[in-house]
């Protein structure tokens, strides 16, 4: 979602840092952008709707500045136009903001009573005016920030320039990520350190209710009381955070292809020394049950884990959508381990659910891709997936890394609670050691996926069905397709078709299914026959020898339960990719979607 970059330097022009930074944040999703910088001792603001190229075209090419702030906005309050775009300026204060000010209407009324007027429909302009109001009142920026933090309800990462202190950037943080990168040349503020990795890999993380004064040679971080804090300086590995597209047309295809190595990389520490290394993983036998929480694709990864924990290790496991969990009766207990799955580690609903569980002192575990992200720092214990940076909005390699790590966690649990024999555990480890070969074979089956995509891309409604684990995989398959091709695609438990959905089947309606469970395959195939009898075109992904020349069949290798999800999902991902390619959509940045959803 929204992105922030700010930079300050003694002798360097920071405008290229701001623009490159914004471009690096583009993948997160946005619909307008803007920049503010010091020009002839005055703040100059340039804003546009649409892509960053529009902003670049509007900027005076010869302008240079030593201090500036920039923003990509994903519209929440007010349309995606240049008035609502950030930066906002009210009297002495110019700022950019990520997050949502929940009590902005009440604050706006108070400010209007105090003679403030507003040009935009945003909550951010209200935040700007409120900071100005307190700054006028106290004539002291520390006091103004402290009062602001006490008064505002909601989330914010703010970077601002204060007119009477043009040698500093001020940054404030609550529930929305913000880091301060330092280098000899320039100090840079960003909502994601990876946006400014070209300039520095060393950074401070701000915690909630902390703020900082960033000048060209110094960073002073304070708490809400104004007391100076001593913070740890972090460093990020530049190589692991490579964001080049290489020879690929889309990041999504590059990321799908990378799965031949990312899955093994993620599980390797836990299998390289056989059974011994599996036991490095947390011991789950002390818990009666497991809860899993996530959003979107992460939620779907949780469902795969539910299948393994329940069906293979005989351990009860419930999976919740974070946006629902945070507002429902969660029946929390110390006997339940709650696992939070998130690629970014910054998803607002997942963070709120985590805070809820922590407030009751119940145990938590994170499965997170981004190091030092909010969730990774809040959970009791964090296991990192090693997918590397995922740029395409539609998640692929992060999902398979999550599934792989959860599968290995379930395997180690099965070993500990003796629901899986040691010999069988060793066989699964062997399978994981061979996974690169299996995945490569599936990735190379391009002609098959393209043939299917040619049949799908002109369709308006597509159905995905399955039973058990295959039902959970059909949910992820349908999500991939709708996210990037904009074709309406839905997933249903195959047994539910007759209870309603079958009325939607007409001549040539595509129905996709996977069948990888000997106990359920015949039933799924019967359901496919039922839809075929009503005119549907049927596509089946299976690891059986099932032959039927009225179906289009994608064969995948046979495997234990622990690898099935990884093998089924590759065809689903590539079918979605090629369908979107034929439709000509913006595959890496689908309309209206954001990579990291930092508001609820
Ligand atoms: C957004 C992204 C999805 C992702 C979901 C959860 O919807 O577009 O790809 O699955 O957020 O994100 P997280 O970072 O928590 O895994």
Image (spheres, rainbow, N blue to C red):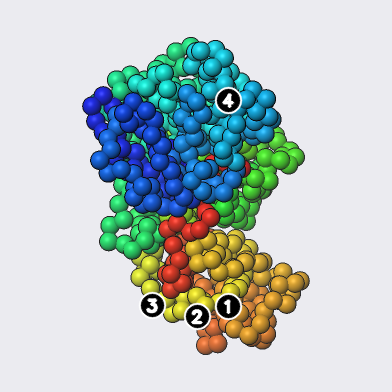
What percent of the width, then of the height, locates residue 162?
44, 23
Rendered image quadrant of residue 255: bottom left
Q: Secondary structure at mark 2?
A: helix
The reply to whether dot 2 and dot 1 touch (C-beta < 8 Å) is yes
Q: Secondary structure at mark 3?
A: helix
What crowding class fits label 2: few (fewer than 14 Cα within 10 Å), some (14-19), or many (20 or more)?
few
- Residue position marked by numbered label 4 in the rendering: 130
Question: Which one is earlier in the sequence, the residue at label 2 or at label 1?
Answer: 2
Q: Quadrant of the C terminus?
A: top right
Q: What distance separates the C-alpha of mark 2 from that of mark 4?
A: 56 Å
- Residue position marked by numbered label 2 in the rendering: 455
Look at 53% across and 26% down and name the residue there: 208
Question: Which one is earlier in the sequence, the residue at label 1 or at label 4?
Answer: 4
Q: In front here: 504 or 103?
A: 103
Q: Is mark 3 within 8 Å of ligand 1?
A: no
Q: What distance separates the C-alpha of mark 2 from that of mark 3?
A: 13 Å
Look at 44% across and 62% down and name the residue there: 586
What percent of the width, then of the height, locates residue 409?
51, 46
- Residue position marked by numbered label 3 in the rendering: 447
What crowding class fits label 4: few (fewer than 14 Cα within 10 Å), some (14-19), or many (20 or more)?
many
Question: Which one is earlier in the sequence, the residue at label 2 or at label 4?
Answer: 4
Residue 422, compared with residue 599, is above or below; it is below
Residue 582, compared with residue 187, is above or below; it is below
């Amino acid at each position: 979602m929204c992105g922030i970059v700010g930079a300050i330097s003694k002798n360097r022009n920071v405008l290229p840092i701001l623009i490159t930074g914004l471009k690096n944040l583009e993948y997160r999703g946005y619909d307008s952008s803007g920049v503010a910088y010091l020009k002839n001792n005055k703040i100059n603001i340039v804003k546009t709707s649409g892509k960053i190229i529009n902003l670049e075209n509007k900027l005076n090419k010869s302008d240079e500045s030593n201090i500036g702030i920039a923003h990509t906005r994903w519209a929440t309050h007010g349309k995606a136009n240049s008035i609502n775009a950030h930066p906002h300026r009210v009297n002495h204060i110019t700022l950019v903001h990520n997050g949502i000010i929940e009590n902005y209407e009440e604050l706006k009324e108070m400010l209007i009573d105090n003679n403030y007027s507003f040009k935009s429909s945003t909550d951010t302009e209200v935040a700007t005016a409120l900071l100005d109001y307190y700054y006028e009142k106290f004539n002291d920026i520390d006091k103004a920030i402290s009062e602001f933090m006490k008064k505002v309800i909601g989330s914010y990462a703010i970077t601002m320039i204060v007119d009477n202190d043009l040698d500093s950037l001020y940054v404030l943080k609550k529930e929305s990520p913000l880091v301060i990168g330092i280098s000899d040349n320039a100090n840079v503020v960003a909502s994601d350190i990876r946006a400014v990795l070209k300039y520095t890999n060393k950074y401070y993380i701000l915690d909630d209710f902390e703020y900082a004064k960033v000048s060209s040679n110094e960073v002073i971080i304070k708490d809400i009381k104004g007391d100076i804090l001593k913070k740890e300086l972090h460093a990020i590995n530049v190589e692991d955070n490579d964001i080049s597209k290489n020879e690929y047309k889309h990041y999504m295809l590059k990321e799908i292809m990378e799965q031949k190595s990312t899955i093994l990389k993620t599980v390797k520490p836990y299998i390289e020394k056989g059974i011994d290394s599996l036991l490095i993983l947390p011991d789950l036998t002390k818990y009666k049950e497991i809860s899993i929480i996530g959003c979107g694709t992460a939620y779907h990864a949780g469902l795969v884990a539910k299948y393994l924990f329940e069906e293979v290790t005989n351990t009860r496991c419930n999976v919740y959508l974070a946006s629902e969990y945070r507002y429902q009766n969660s029946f929390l207990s110390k006997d339940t381990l709650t696992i939070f799955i998130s690629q970014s580690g910054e998803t607002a609903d997942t963070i709120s659910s985590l805070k809820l569980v922590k407030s009751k002192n119940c145990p938590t575990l994170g499965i997170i891709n981004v190091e030092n992200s909010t969730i990774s720092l809040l959970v009791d214990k964090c296991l990192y997936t090693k997918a590397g940076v995922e740029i395409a909005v539609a998640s692929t390699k992060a999902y398979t890394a999550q599934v792989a790590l959860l599968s290995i966690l379930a395997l180690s649990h099965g070993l500990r609670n003796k629901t899986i024999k040691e010999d069988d555990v060793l066989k699964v480890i062997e399978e994981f050691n061979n996974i690169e070969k299996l995945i490569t074979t599936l990735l190379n089956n391009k002609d098959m996926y393209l043939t299917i995509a040619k049949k799908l891309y002109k369709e308006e409604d597509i159905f995905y069905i399955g039973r058990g684990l295959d039902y959970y995989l059909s949910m992820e398959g349908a999500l991939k397709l709708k996210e990037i091709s904009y074709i309406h695609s839905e997933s249903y438990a195959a047994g539910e078709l007759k209870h309603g959905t079958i009325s939607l089947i007409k001549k040539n309606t595509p129905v996709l299914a996977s069948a990888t469970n000997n106990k359920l395959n015949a039933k799924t195939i019967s359901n496919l026959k039922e839809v075929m009898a009503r005119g549907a075109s049927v596509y089946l992904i299976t690891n059986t020898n099932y032959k039927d020349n009225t179906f289009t069949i994608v064969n995948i290798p046979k495997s234990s339960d622990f690898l099935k999800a990884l093998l089924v999902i590759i065809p689903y991902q590539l079918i979605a990719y090629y369908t979107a390619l034929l439709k000509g959509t913006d595959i890496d940045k689908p309309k209206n979607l954001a990579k990291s959803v930092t508001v609820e």
